Image (cartoon, rainbow, N blue to C red):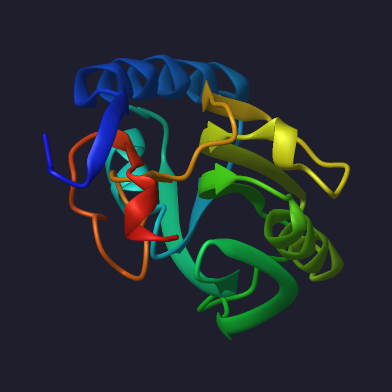
Amino acid sequence: MHPMIKKVLVSEEQIVQRCKELGKQIDEEYKDNECPILLVALLKGSVPFMAELMKRITIDVQIDFMDVSSYDGTESIGDIKINKDLDGSCKGIDIILVEDIVDTGRTIHTVKEMLLNKKANSVKIIALLDKPSRRVVDISADYVGFEIENEFVVGFGLDYDQNYRNLPYVGVLKEECYK
């Protein structure tokens, strides 16, 4: 375990197992789609989750990325900035937004509304982690890996100041790192 991690919250093995379960659920729900679904990863944190998840989905999928920011240090500032939009049109496409964590809900709510305004057929949300105690916007993920308490977590894509993303698990960061 990394010396700056207080405890491992979700192990790599738990993440892999949950991705298998979520992949089967997505396969079942979209098995009759005529067109591939589009997995849209919100950069940078959701990339490891999407990479693990898409290996577990057997139906046809396409992938794309959006770069959206709303954090300053450890706090969501509420101002959503789109740094990179989708490469193509999403008109008529079923989209699953892949998020590392749904915290306040501001970011994912804004992105979902934006894609629906661009005439996506549907937009669902899959999150590795859900932290409902911090929610300030009325939104919930359609698929959730793990619900967690209000602790500052890093690893498996989640970061603090661009560090710790490469940890193969989700861990609670020691407070002295960010206080």
Residue 6 is drawn in which quadrant? top left
User: Is 175 left or right of 155, judged from the image as shown?
Assistant: right
Question: Could you say which is closer to the camera, residue 62 or residue 129?
Answer: 129
The residue at the point 77 percent across, 51 percent down is 121
The residue at the point 65 percent across, 46 percent down is 103
Quadrant holding the N terminus: top left
| Residue farthest to the bottom, as pictured | 83
Q: Position of residue 34 (x, y in %)?
A: 59, 39
Question: Could you say which is closer to the camera, residue 125 or residue 5?
Answer: 5
Quadrant holding the C terminus: bottom left
Q: Position of residue 43 (x, y in %)?
A: 43, 66
The residue at the point 65 percent across, 64 percent down is 76
Would you place residue 165 above or below residue 61 in this image?
below
Residue 132 is drawn in which quadrant? top right
Question: Could you say which is closer to the camera, residue 69 or residue 74?
Answer: 74
Q: Position of residue 10 (x, y in %)?
A: 33, 24
Residue 110 is drawn in which quadrant? bottom right
The residue at the point 71 percent across, 64 percent down is 111
Would you place residue 165 above or below residue 65 in this image?
above
Question: Could you say which is closer to the camera, residue 178 or residue 35?
Answer: 178
Q: Position of residue 95 (x, y in %)?
A: 62, 50
